Each structure stands twice: as C-alpha cells, then as structure tokens.
Amino acid sequence: MRRTLFATTLLAALAVVPSAHGALRTFQTPSGNIACMIVDGRSVRCDIRQKAWSPPPAPRSCEQDWGNGLSVGARGKGRIVCAGDTVLSPPGDPYRVLAYGKSIKVGVITCTSRTSGLTCRNTRGGGFALSRQSYRLF
C-alpha cells in the first residue's frame, strides 16, 4: 500500500507545469549506469544500476529501498535516498546523455559527468559524487 501511494504521489509530482527553471530535467551518464532527475532547479536525485559499494545500514525511518541513489536539495549536504521508486530510465526509452567532461546547470543545481563518475552540487557547496566504485556526500 505504501509503495502504491508513493508511486501515485511521484506520478502526480511529475505532472508539474514547467516553471521558469523548466520543472523537470532528466539525463544519464554515457554508460547508462547513473540516471538523474533535476526538479525545478532546486533538487537532484541520481540513481545507480550497478555498484560495487554498499550504503550504511538504513535508518529505522526508511521503510522503502535504501541506498540505490543519492540526492541534494538547494541547501544542505547530499544524502542517501530512501525510495520505493527509481529515476533510472525505462528500458527502450533512454534519457538525454550528459557526455563525459560536460555539465548541466539548472537553477541552483550543477551536475558534471566524468569517466570517474558523476558529481552534483548546489550553489552552497553541498552535494555528492557517485560512481560504480564509490560514493561521497559533502
């Protein structure tokens, strides 16, 4: 029931009318292993398909899947995602590719793709680095 409610809420959120920042931007790394969604230029969430690292134990407050992605908002540090959904692109419908060495900036969020992984941050310096081998929150 909780997953169904969350999925319904997420679908409703995706039907947002575009704002000055462009409501919703999706992209993936060239490998297709990491996909991200920037919402209203104020937050970003990136999920990963395959990883060689494990997140710390889930907090008791997380009743969904834990550690399959990272996020950061307009303020504060990056955090591990607790969610019952994914922002990975659906099979056969890939997102725009953010080429290695390129960045995307929407509102207060900037993400940069490199062969070593993806880094996303807000204008206050909070964010995360994500790759198949590791992750880092800052």
Image (tube, rainbow, N blue to C red):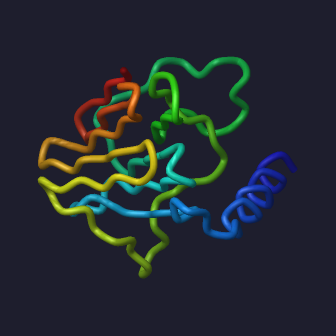
Name the residue located 50 percent from the left edge and 51 percent from the top edge: 41
Q: Nearer the viewer, residue 12 or 35?
A: 12
Q: Nearer the viewer, residue 65 or 70?
A: 70
Name the residue located 61 percent from the left edge and 35 percent from the top edge: 82
Name the residue located 46 percent from the left edge and 60 percent from the top edge: 88
Quadrant of image for the C terminus: top left
Give the residue furthest to the front: 20
Task: Give residue 37's position: percent from left, percent from top.
Answer: 48, 56
Name the residue located 45 percent from the left edge and 27 percent from the top edge: 78
* Snapshot quadrant of residue 117: top left
Q: Nearer the viewer, residue 127 or 89?
A: 127
Give the residue furthest to the bottom: 92
Residue 114 against residue 99 in the figure, above or below: above
Task: Give residue 97's position: percent from left, percent from top.
Answer: 28, 68
Residue 127 against residue 94 in the figure, above or below: above
Task: Give residue 136's position: percent from left, percent from top.
Answer: 32, 25
Task: Give residue 60's position: percent from left, percent from top.
Answer: 71, 18
Give the mark count. Answer: 0
